Image (cartoon, helix red, strand yellow):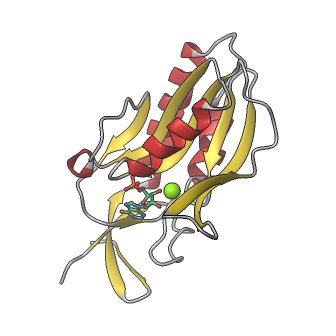
Amino acid sequence: MDLVTVKDKQFAISLSEERIRQRVAETAAQISQDLEGKNPVFLAVLNGSFVFAADLMRGISIPCEINFVRFSSYEGMNSTGSVKELLGLNQSLKGRTVVVIEDIIDSGLTMQELLVYLQKFEPTDLKVASLLVKPGNMQVKLDIDYTCFEIPNDFIVGYGLDYDGFGRNLPAIYTVVEG
Ligand code: IMP
Ligand code: MG
């Protein structure tokens, strides 16, 4: 078995570079077909989606733009709870077809909040492309337009996804080995 160690845990290969390459190319072709003539703006959500976004973009064959954004929570001075803010958005989304690029949708809570937030910028159309989805963990109902892979609830690393900051550089996707 192809095992790697990231920090204190062992991981086994789950999706090979070749499988990811093929599926990402297929997804890019589908998006290019569906959004022909729409000049979409891609919003890649940092950090996790940077590898997926780079590969997906190179498969897009229609005119498009990309922004890299970070959706982070901060504690307001007198706030009752955490408030989310979007960093890095440097163009108008008004009247545009927007495609959010995520690495993984787990509970779905982050994406749900992000979509509500993005609606304020008045895009004409708001779509979601996620490399991975864990349907077994989903706590909210989300309409995910493009999913490359549905995976079990186990923790994974690689291809941009991290375990405590490490493992993003792995070219394939690996699942934690419990032991
Ligand atoms: P959620 O959908 O709001 O639960 O959160 C999704 C976020 O949790 C992702 O953007 C990842 O940063 C992180 N995440 C969820 N599952 C994993 C995993 O298996 N490996 C690495 N990060 C994960
Ligand atoms: Mg993420």
In the image, 53 versus 115, the foreground residue is 115
Classify 61 as above or below 22.
above
Q: Determine whether, in the image, residue 37 is placed left or right of residue 139.
A: right
Q: Position of residue 12 (x, y in %)?
A: 31, 70
Q: Position of residue 19 (x, y in %)?
A: 41, 46
In this view of the protein, can residue 160 be seen by the observer? no
Classify 90 as above or below 169.
above
Q: Position of residue 131 (x, y in %)?
A: 45, 45
In this view of the protein, can residue 148 be seen by the observer? yes
Q: Quadrant of residue 148?
A: top left
Q: Determine whether, in the image, residue 100 is placed left or right of residue 156.
A: right
In the image, 115 versus 37, the foreground residue is 115
The quarter of the image holding the C terminus is bottom left
The residue at the point 31 percent across, 66 percent down is 155
In terms of image quarters, where does ligand 1 lie?
A: bottom left
Among all residues in the image, which is located at the extreme left? Answer: 179
The quarter of the image holding the N terminus is bottom left
The residue at the point 60 percent across, 66 percent down is 74
Q: Determine whether, in the image, residue 103 is placed left or right of residue 58.
A: left
Q: Position of residue 144 (x, y in %)?
A: 40, 32
Among all residues in the image, which is located at the extreme top? Answer: 37
Classify 158 as above or below 104.
below
Among all residues in the image, which is located at the extreme front? Answer: 78
The residue at the point 50 percent across, 33 percent down is 128
